[in-house]
Amino acid sequence: MNKFQLLFMIFAVVWKGIQGCDRGLTQLRYRQSLDLMYCLLGPYGTPDPCQRLAGGHSAKCQPMENGFFVCCGTPELLYEILTGAPPILSHWQKLHNDLAKFAKLYEKMEEEKRTTPLSAFFEADDAAYEDLEYDEEVPVTLPPMKLIKSVPNVDQKAPAPKVVTRPSTPPSTLPPTESSTPPTTLASTPPPKPPKIYKPGPSRSIIVVAKSKHKSLLNKPQNSPIITANGPVLSLLGSGHFLPNFGKSITFSAPATVVHLQDGPCSIIVNTGLPSQHSELRAALQQKSISDATFNYTVITSLQPQFIGNLALFPTNSLILGAWTVDGNQISDSSIRHRHERTLCSSNTVLVSTPGPTSDSVAVIAKNVPGMGTVVIAGSLFIQDDDINRVDALFTSHVAELFESRQMLICQADWIVPAHSMPIPISRKLKEKAECGE
């Protein structure tokens, strides 16, 4: 599709889609399908959902003649959505799509980073970058960025390396840094082993991510026990997503994130996904050689359909469904209501009450997870992101309790695992929003 065809299509969409919107605004549509961007208004005082759907731009959820609600915005915003121009951090996105520019940028930084601060490579007067923060320790990959790589600390007195190579994919941990002082080698001793050199990938690129609501999640809290030896091991058996589909009736594509915790000899499953995830979960269990295992605990964070579809796939000694516990044929109240805590395998794995999604919702807190610190498997407390102000009316029973539970978990965790996405590290800015204090 050439530019003229695209402009004609946008003109036709704008011309057709002005009903139901204030003067000067038009109905917004999704880029791929051109379907209308329908919306649901939450309780009074909650943010307009269209601002999130439109990527942070000014948009309003307004009623149509048929009784549905649709997102309305300016024709310029519709153009940005349909052409793929990102409404947030467009400079970074455009730069990311040009790998040649990234390679040149990286080479220039390698040459000058010992004498020039990193911020000097970018425009300091751009208000969009006033909150830039750089993580120099943990490389992270977050959507929609394709590659996020941190810059390792370099001794200012060390000589510049002659060869700089990068891996084709970001490693899970940074390689150990070499000492700036060369070791003393005696003639009788064997020569030292040469340092490991990573083979270069198809491109060498670097991204420094600006701090924003959804993408600036690179900085862990200070004094956090990130690397531990004996903490529980967390793995994902099933990955989730959350896509609303608005038509005659509102439906959702919502496979859940299924988590396995191994705390010493004790094992925990958190949520079991939809029935459609059965094959994916069975394959994951077989790959981990635990397909025939009986788990110590299976925790369902709330009795919502996306969490209970594969209970039979996880034989368990103790089934926890919200505030209820099933041990064999015995059903009992787990006494976890009103933010009471309950130890599961050890002091490193704790069940805590988190009302909000439902009155008896729970979350699992895993402490001292290697490489992560304190991780909260939060269920529907966070649907698919770390937006502390987001309210999904169909998955919320009490808004005030929802915010209180979110604040409690954000203030004590380093990572959260939402109901329908990959784990997300908690930024300092998010802790400030939650008023966690020192």
Image (cartoon, rainbow, N blue to C red):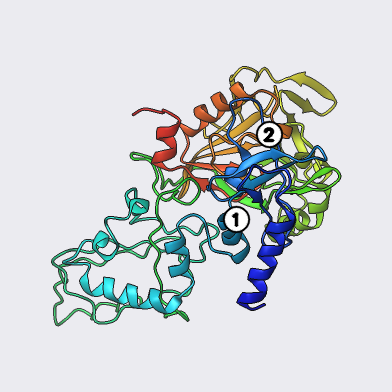
Q: Which mark is residue 75?
A: 1
Quarter in which the N terminus is drawn: bottom right
Between 377 and 61, the one nearer to me in the picture: 61
Q: Residue at x 29, y 79 (%)?
A: 194
Q: Amino acid at mark 1?
A: Pro
Whole-percent x and y of residue 268?
A: 66, 40
Q: Amino acid at mark 2?
A: Leu
Check the image and report above or below for 94 versus 134. Answer: below
Residue 264 appears in the picture as rendered: no
Whole-percent x and y of residue 375?
A: 52, 40
**Residue that mark 2 sits on:** 41
On the rendered structure, is 102 left or right of 358? left
Whole-percent x and y of residue 199?
A: 42, 80
Q: Which mark is residue 382?
A: none
From this viewpoint, which residue is outermost toward the front? Answer: 23
Between 417 and 117, the one nearer to me in the picture: 117
Element assignment for label 2: loop
Between 269 and 141, the one nearer to me in the picture: 141
On the rendered structure, is 43 left or right of 294? left
Element assignment for label 1: helix
Q: Residue at x 82, y 52 (%)?
A: 276
Q: Assess disc 2: are there few (<14), some (14-19) or many (≥20) residues with their C-alpha within 10 Å of its C-alpha.
A: some
Q: CA distance from mark 1 to mark 2?
A: 22 Å
Residue 190 appears in the picture as rendered: yes
Q: Residue at x 46, y 66 (%)?
A: 170
Q: Assess disc 1: are there few (<14), some (14-19) or many (≥20) residues with their C-alpha within 10 Å of its C-alpha.
A: many
